[in-house]
Every structure is written in structure tokens, then in C-alpha cells.
Amino acid sequence: MRDEPTWRIPVGMLAMIIGLTIYAIVIARYVPDVIGDWHALLQTVVYLFFGVVWLLPLRRFMIWMEAGRSD
């Protein structure tokens, strides 16, 4: 447990906000052009996939923010 504040938390939160914003803009800009003519259920699956896939690197990123290591 840390006793002092660390720079990694505010920098990590800022990086996460910027990264997720860029990710969302890219998905919103390019995915509809590719899947716009697909059936609504297939589009739902694609958007659910992209809505969950950003969570994959989050565990290591949060460990780095809190502890300074990237297990």
C-alpha cells in the first residue's frame, strides 16, 4: 500500500480518457461505413464486441497506475 500520492494515477486517468475518446471516435467514424448495410442483429454483435474489447488491456493499465508495475 502506498503512503504518498503518485503521478501515475492522474497521468493514467488522462491517458485513459484521451485513449477511449480516440477509440470511440475511430469506431464511430469507420465502423458504420463497413457494417451499415448488415442486418441489425449482426451490427449489434459488432458494436457489443467493440464496446467490450477496450476492457482487455485495462487490468494491466490499472495495475500500472496503482502499483507502478505491469504484471
Image (cartoon, rainbow, N blue to C red):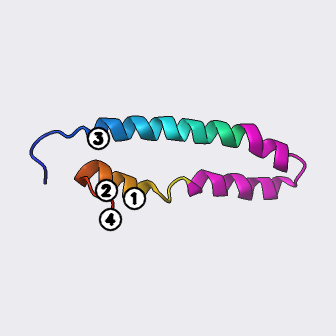
Residue tagged by mark 4?
A: 71
Q: Amino acid at mark 1?
A: Arg
38 horizontally vs 61: left or right: right
The amino acid sitting under disc 4 is: Asp
Q: Separation of disc 4 and disc 3 at Cα?
A: 17 Å
* Residue named by callout 1: 59
Q: Which of pointers 2 and 3 lies earlier in the amino acid sequence?
A: 3
Q: Nearer the viewer, residue 38 or 3?
A: 3
Confirm or deny contact between disc 1 and disc 2 (CB under 8 A): yes
Where residue 3 appears, x then y in whole percent?
A: 9, 45
Say which element carries label 4.
loop
Give the SS element for disc 2: helix
* Residue that numbered label 2 is attached to: 63
- Closer-to-camera residue (41/36): 36
The amino acid sitting under disc 3 is Ile
Segment tinted magenta in the rendering: 29-53
Q: Is 41 included in the stretch rendered in magenta?
A: yes
State how far apart marks 1 and 2 are (Cα).
6 Å
* Identity, as a three-letter code, of the amino acid under mark 2: Ile
* Residue at figure coordinates x 44%, y 41% from the top left: 16
Question: Percent x, y for residue 30?
Answer: 76, 42
Q: Nearer the viewer, mark 4 or mark 1?
A: 4
Q: Which mark is residue 9?
A: 3
